[in-house]
Amino acid sequence: MTPAGERGPAALQEARRALAELTAVARTVRGRLGDQAVVAQEAACRRLRRRLDLGLDHTVVALIGGTGSGKSSLFNRIGEMTFSEVGVLRPTTADAVAFVWGGDAGPFLDWLGVARDNWIRRDSVLDGDVAAMRGLILLDLPDYDSASGEHREVVDRVLPLADLLVWVTDPQKYADPSLHRDYSGVLAQRVGNLAVVLNQVDTLAPDDVPAVLQDLSRLLKRAGSDVPNVVVTSALTGDGVDSLRQLLVAARTEEATPAERARVLLGREATRLREEIGPPDGLDRSWIEPARRAARDQLLALVEAAPEPDEPNPAPQIPSVEQIHGVLLGWLERALVAVPAPWGAAVGRSLASGVNIRARLDEAVTAALAGSVADAAQPAAAPLSRRGRRARRRAEPEAAAASAAGSRHAALERAVSAVVERTMTFPTNAVLDDWVAVTGKLLALAAGSRGQAGAAA
């Protein structure tokens, strides 16, 4: 393992780089995904940016548990003094309270929303093994299963901010459905930054402990959280508290933990957003060219009105907005086959409106016809013999008509093709290019976070 003091600044720099990339992705996908997905991701980016700005001088550890798990008693044991209220009435802990070992933790506690009256410094015990805890912020959160909505709000607000989450449970409530229903996702997302404590082990017969641990591990794995081990404690007797304290010391002495955790969270945000966007695997744009030709032919047929017998070159007909909408719907039907729904909708939003396409067609067709008339009026490039001139005079009426018609058709085809390219092909390809680019970046961010976590281990 690389020494923490050497890896810390590098990990912080790498986390900042990954955060900048994820923020750029958020800007790209804004307006092309549902607002809920983008807003959640941007909020996560802001939260991580603030955490990185606070630096690596402190490590935030949060104790969380259900009513009666003995979480607050365990908190007091770790801090070696009674600070978090313990009582008969439950839930007792109404606000987050904190022990702080050394350093200026004020900015951290303000960010965490811990009132100044709810934290205490432990400088007076900075001797022996406890000195290794310097820079540690230990939080006791309200019970997650509290009937009070305010208590639950505190838990939900602080949980994403902790560098290490210590889940405290007990033999009676480790299988609590509300835990696994409401917080299984939280557990699954904390792999590498989660410790589980089975407290109140004094209420079990020694022979029953292995069976309870095995069942607890099974439930955690079912929730998607592969926790390496569970710390067994008794806040009443003090058994196992030293082992838990050593775990916290290890988290604190690993100075790069906050930065590495930020990278892990960035990777998970990248994975979540990539799933929301839809993977570009197997993206096939072979439908673009047939769709372009179909749209061109449809619009060209509408523009080129059938000539009357006495009118070889009738005035062009500019399609109605309703007719153009029909062409656009045909385009989208082809696009939505190959593109996931969020980006198919983004393709639809990127296309010009029927009104704008009609105006562009009018402008392009007018310019094209003016150009085709000028081309048809150009004289022959080379002089002809007398016989050739007679033959040309005999063929001139038909040739002139054919030339004018051909020039007119070619000019209109070029004009309509240009409008289709500008209003359908280009904006669609721009959306697909962004789709491929952002999913590639998200995949790299997710892979980078996994590689970093493996290197740290």
Image: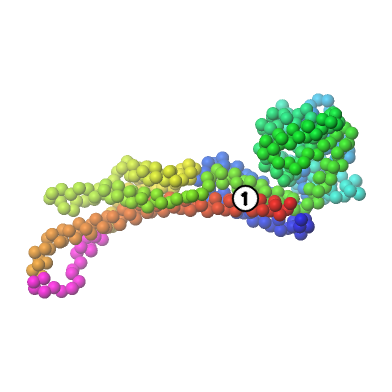
Where is residue 449? Give x, y as percent.
66, 51
| Left or right: 147, with 405 as reference point | right
Q: Nearer the viewer, residue 7 or 89?
A: 7
Does the magenta-highlighted stretch encompass residue 375? Answer: yes
Q: Quadrant of the N terminus?
A: bottom right
Q: Is residue 295 visible?
A: yes
Q: Residue furthest top?
A: 89
Does the magenta-highlighted stretch encompass residue 292? Answer: no
Where is residue 193? Give x, y as percent.
73, 45
Q: Is residue 54 visible?
A: no
Task: Kindly identify the amino acid type of the residue bearing the numbered disc 1.
Answer: Ala
Q: Is 413 rendered above or below residue 341?
A: below
Residue plotted at (85% across, 42% down): 243
| Left or right: 39, with 421 as reference point | right
Where is residue 261? Give x, y as percent.
70, 48
| Left or right: 382, with 202 as reference point | left
Residue plotted at (79% across, 30% down): 171
- Estimate how packed mark 1 is, as few (under 14), some (14 to 19) or many (20 or more) residues with alpha carbons within 10 Å: many
Q: Is 188 rendered above or below residue 258?
A: above
Give the residues in magenta. 371-388
Where is residue 287? Give x, y as percent.
40, 49
Residue plotted at (72% across, 46% down): 192
**SS at mark 1?**
helix
Q: Which residue is mark 1?
A: 446
Residue plotted at (75% across, 31% down): 174
